[in-house]
Amino acid sequence: MKRMLKLSLAYLRYYKKQTFSLFLGVLLSAALLGGIGSLLYSGRQQNIEKARQDYGDWHYYFQSDEQQAKTILEKKKGNGYEIEEVGILTIRKVLEEPYKVMMVHGEDSYLHMMNRKLLEGNYPKEANEVAMDTYVLRNLGIPEKIGSKVELDGESFILSGILSESVEGTEDYMQVFVHKSVDYGQNGVFVYLKFLEDRPIYKELSAFCQEFHSEKENMRRNNHLDGYVGGTAPAAFSEVFRVSVMEQGTGIPYLYAYYNESGQLTNAVILAALGIFGVFIIYSLFQVSVRKRMSQYSVMQTLGMEEKHTFGILFGELLLIFVAGFPLGCLLGNGIAALLYGKIGRIFVGVQEKGIRHTGVEQDLSQISVSSIGDIGRFYVDKKLLLCCLLFFVAVLVFLSLFLVRKMRRYTWGQMIRKESGKKQKNRKIYSLHRKNLTGILTKKFMFGKISAFVGILFSLSIGGIIFLGATYVTENTKIHNELTFKADDGLGSDIQVFEDSDSLHDTIPTYMAEEIRKLPGVRSVNTMNYMLGEIPLYDGKLVWTSYFAETDPSDDLEPDPVLMEKYNGRATIEGDGDYKLKVNVYGYDDEMLLELSDYLLEGSIDPDTMRKEDTVIFKTIMGGQGTYEGIAVKAGESITLKTPRSTEVPAEVLKFQEEDTFYTEQEFGVAALVSRPLAKTEAFIGDDGTDTVDIIMTREQMEKYFGITGYRNLGITLKEGVDGAVVSDEIRKLTKSVPKCMVKDYTRMIQAENAFVEQKMLFFYGVAIVMLGISVLHIINSMQYLVAARKHEFGILRAMGITDTGFRRMLFREGVRYGIYTNLVLFALYFPIQKILYYFLIRVYLYLNPVAWVSPAPVIGLLVLNVAICILAMEWAGRSILEEGIIEEINE
């Protein structure tokens, strides 16, 4: 073994160029895999911390009583479980007017789990003291000053403390914290559990439920943290696979989404792709070096060297280079990754996932800066990944050495000595009888003389281009998707929003208010939205996805929302076999917003003038879990019957649509278009997250004509360039102060942050693609150098026969052009199906809105030109060594 290592080292020293190329290939492959792996790992770790910060550091909660809560505190460790922390929240009173307020008492552990920190003052020490956050103070109109008077349900309290804001998901009721002695006789106790995370959490939950005789069905889990800590028992793969194959509407997207709950499968796919790419590059570079020394291996085998010794020499070369290149690559990759993470770490943390509060917030968003949104945390080196990479590459080195040794068996010793690559038919055809210029024939013969090298070069260059085009395609669609979701799902279509935080139809913003806001300095435009609640019949099987709504699910797996059932009799009702009625949001948009809905168009056309003239509406349908919209069989050109309350001044019971017909009116409208999302929307009634409810959208004139509605539910305000959103927001608050339950949200900083996020993500994708393209170019140059060097004898004869240096360069130029053209053909042949797969995954798995079917032409044209240029330059550069040597030496090669 020692002798073989010495021989391997001698080869590495002698063939310095090939050694350096292979060293760079190992270095860059390790750097790319280790660096990106640590970036993804750092993002995942910070996502876990971010989930704790944004949604609370707890795993499960359930409704209990004081006695059971006390027992749990006394027995935090049991058979199969160990509780790290228990938080207890006691509800003292719930108020519905003028705002939804919950008077509660929280133990210290609860406050800690919910990231409630005391910013000023102290937690209530007396029965007449309360504490709350600035979010609640501003909505209740209470000065942010300790000692301020607080009126709640006819009682007077003193503000003793100001807390940090609550975690996401607790916005339905504003929390006011009271002293533990306050008791109104309507207490509800909720227990929050955080288990030790040294084992799967779902197993600890089972043991806990068995210990305290609790039902798992009553446990509510922290969905945003659950996927990271194993909070749900995984189903057997056979069952998941069966569902994906047998159940309609599942398939590959279901299988992928099931195992990608917290993004771990996506990360694994990315790292696997990078690993395979690295293996291909190492193999391609090394096989060129091996082909160069085939005659030497043949001589040694003739003298008695066995195959195991050949394997030892090859493996020794790879191992020596790997020992030098892999650690340096890991250091380089993680060093650059750490710098990148400090600059653009937000793209790995998932800032875009943070929800935006859609109820009753005033100034909190205006104070968020681009740099402070989403703390990226510290950089982590993924040591487990580096160890796996080490073992993976060592196994690859063993496999490559064995593969190349087995490959040599196909050749005789004579073929190896003559460096022939296998069977080669002799062609006695004389081309000079019919052609004056033979350089074209020679170029073709030289190119196809070694098919494996030719195919390897084409594939290597094309794979870099494929990755570049794929990254460009995904990035372009990500930008489009983010822009569309900003406006629709996140409410970022306008810089500032003014809306009514009320579930009463008669609470609206007066029309004159919109005109007053338009007059403010810095305001460019104001878009308006009216609202009415309605119901439509879906008879004769028009509701295709009957299991979509809990109220119509035939399997009874879903439970209807109790609040929606109480207020509106649910979102859907069963009227008969295949007959249903569905609650809908009815929106009135101005012309500008109606035209913007064209970006979400699924079918039909949108023209506000035609809608007014022909009494047509826009139908916003529901979206399935795979980004499809076939759940309701309503198409453009058909008509719908819309039932609504006769006026906005009706009792709350009327909104259940079960009262006498005199309370309602029905209108028939034609459907002008189907869209995938609304723009302005409200969640105050039956809810609207943009995907799971049906919306009927019409013009403002139609809203006034049929429902008598002129007041607005929502105002979307767009500012002029460079205007300070906080200043304009303050002016708007002064104007709307007299309007009951009117709220203001400033999104200017959030929009800037999201735009910066997309730009950083694009730069990173492009950067990775360029690095991989650079690695491919390294292989191309190395391979072409070998091709040219392997033909020194033939080139020497051509030069002796009189070919000029210019003619020789012209021949190489022609060969480079052909390589570029063939590469582009291979690139398109491989990229076309890959883009089809990407398009499928963007729609069905990642639920992208309106992705384009083909990458934009600019990067394609640029890449085609670059491919040809790289091939020409690589060939010309490789040919310089031929011209620098003497003709006699080349002929004797």
Image (cartoon, rainbow, N blue to C red):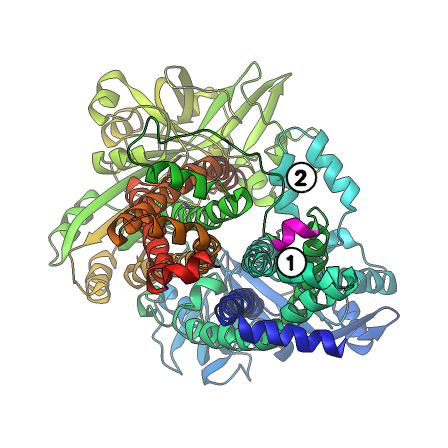
Residue segment shown in magenta: 413-417
How far from the left and from the top, in percent, is residue 134?
A: 40, 72
Q: Is residue 604 left or right of residue 892?
A: left
Q: Earlier in the sequence, mark 2 or mark 1?
A: 1
Residue 142, quarter of picture: bottom left
Residue 681, quarter of picture: top left
Q: Tell me which amino acid carries mark 1.
A: Gly
Q: Is residue 271 left or right of residue 146?
A: right
Where 403 falls versus 697 (above or below)?
A: below
The residue that appears at 64% across and 62% down in the rendered structure is 296
Q: Callout 2: helix, strand or loop?
A: loop
Q: Which mark is residue 227?
A: 1
Distance from Cα at disc 2 to Cα at disc 1: 21 Å
Residue under label 2: 558
Where 399 falls versus 703 (above or below)?
A: below
Question: Chief secondary structure of the magenta span?
Answer: helix
The residue that appears at 47% across and 43% down in the rendered structure is 687
State whether residue 377 appears in this view: no
How far from the left and from the top, in percent, is residue 806?
A: 24, 51
